[in-house]
Amino acid sequence: MKRHLSLVILLLFTQVCVSEAQKDNLRRDEQVIGTPLPNNCDKIIYAVTLPGVILSLGTQDQNQDRVEMTALLPFRCNAIAKTFNNKILAVEADKNVSLPVYEFSPSSKTGKYTKWKLPSHNDGGWISGGTDGLGRIYFATTTMKYLVRIDLRLNDVEVIWSSKEKIYGGNKITCTEGCNFYVNEKSEILIKENKKNISYKVVANESPYLYETKTMEGFFNTITVNDWYEFTNDKQQNTSMFVMRDGITVFKDGEYRPKVVKVDTLRFGIVTDIAGCDAKENKKPRIIINEKREKEILEAATKKESIRLEKILFKLGLSELQTTSYQELDELVMILLKNKQLKILLEGHTDISGDADDNFKLSIERVNTCRDYLIKYGVSPTRINTKGYGGTKPLVKVGSESERAVNRRVEIKFVE
């Protein structure tokens, strides 16, 4: 009888413990894996500078014209992330040893070291953090050799990968000069090389898999970007924030010039990372309008003159654009989107050598490729006509092949 009573009491105790664990989402089992944390995240976006200064950039809906200091961490810092309960997790910079994660509360202005320790490594330090759609926190090292994840309900830090060679699919992630990342609402890891236009997308819920490598069109070919973050504001504008050493560059859909929020680096230090917790990928190109080119085009339109697209180049004998053409076409996109009264005729020309019929066909295919590019990024098809001339209107009739190269061109004529 006593033994039976003991078993009943043990069973009831176990059920109570399980019930409490389920209520608090603390069970270390399949109920935790892949389930979201309660999301109480506000819309404030934070940045950090190398000396450990936490800066408030305003909210996703209302970005500030100037940054405000929120706190000073007790260490130098390159990597922060924001949790669903509005805390900031940070890691000390430039250390390869095992490091505890520091938690700071902007509301109470207090901080403490946590139970989580990031592993030692040989990749220069932890330089970037992010938060996925389930509320899990990620940190990565300088060249993305190490990526770890923290589920706030668990004690352990999960190593997602400890070598880029363990990421399968597509091309390899290079990041030889450093990378940064954020995690979107689908819990996809979006990585950008700091000094290049190359970006990567990785799924890491099971085995890490690289399924997209692309060139980010129309933005920063050589300028160093220390981090990036993207979201949708209350006006449903896709917004991209790029962290420069001395400020934040903000791109919003429908705006033709980026907003630049400067940071006093003498006072606060170099900006190194940015954090929010409601990221959404912006798939549109980030383009800075060329004011000088806009003025030239508007003057040509007023005078009904043709203007040559100097940097439009195609692969030899083909209608496929060379990548160096994208910048000029991107600038043209922005000018046409801003100046909606302009209607254009794209005229294609080839060299005089070769078969005349083939040249005529190629000239039409090439301007249609340019037309398709403009339409792809928002210019109405009704505003663009095309015409091919083949080699019938050469600028240079004699000379070497390099001298006759000017004949291969695309020109714009402005129409009513």
Image (tube, rainbow, N blue to C red):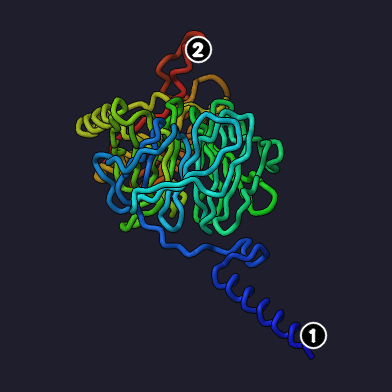
Nearer mark to the viewer, of 2 and 1: 1
Q: CA distance from mark 2 to mark 1?
A: 99 Å
Q: Left or right: 164 with respect to 25?
A: right
Q: Which mark is residue 3?
A: 1
- Residue 68 on image: x %, y %: 27, 41
- Residue 407 on image: x %, y %: 44, 20
Q: Earlier in the sequence, mark 2 or mark 1?
A: 1
- Residue 364 on image: x %, y %: 48, 36
Secondary structure under tag 2 reads: loop
Secondary structure under tag 1 reads: helix
* Quarter occupied by the C terminus: top left
Q: Left or right: 242 with respect to 5?
A: left
Relative to the observer, which residue lies in front, 20 or 5?
5
Please name the residue shown 41% across and 58% down the image: 41
Please, which residue is most extreme toward the top here?
A: 399
- Residue 368 on image: x %, y %: 47, 40
Please name the residue shown 48% across and 17% down the image: 405
Crowding around mark 1 (Cα neighbors within 10 Å: few <14, some 14 to 19, many 20+) is few
Relative to the observer, which residue lies in front, 16 or 358?
16
Disc 1 marks a residue whose amino acid type is Arg
Does residue 122 lie above or below 3 as drawn?
above
Q: Is residue 347 visible?
A: no
Whether residues under marks 2 and 1 lie with C-beta atoms below 8 angstroms apart, the answer is no
Q: Which mark is residue 402?
A: 2
Q: Is residue 258 visible?
A: yes
Please name the residue shown 40% across and 35% down the image: 52
Disc 2 marks a residue whose amino acid type is Ser
Relative to the observer, which residue lies in front, 111 or 62?
111
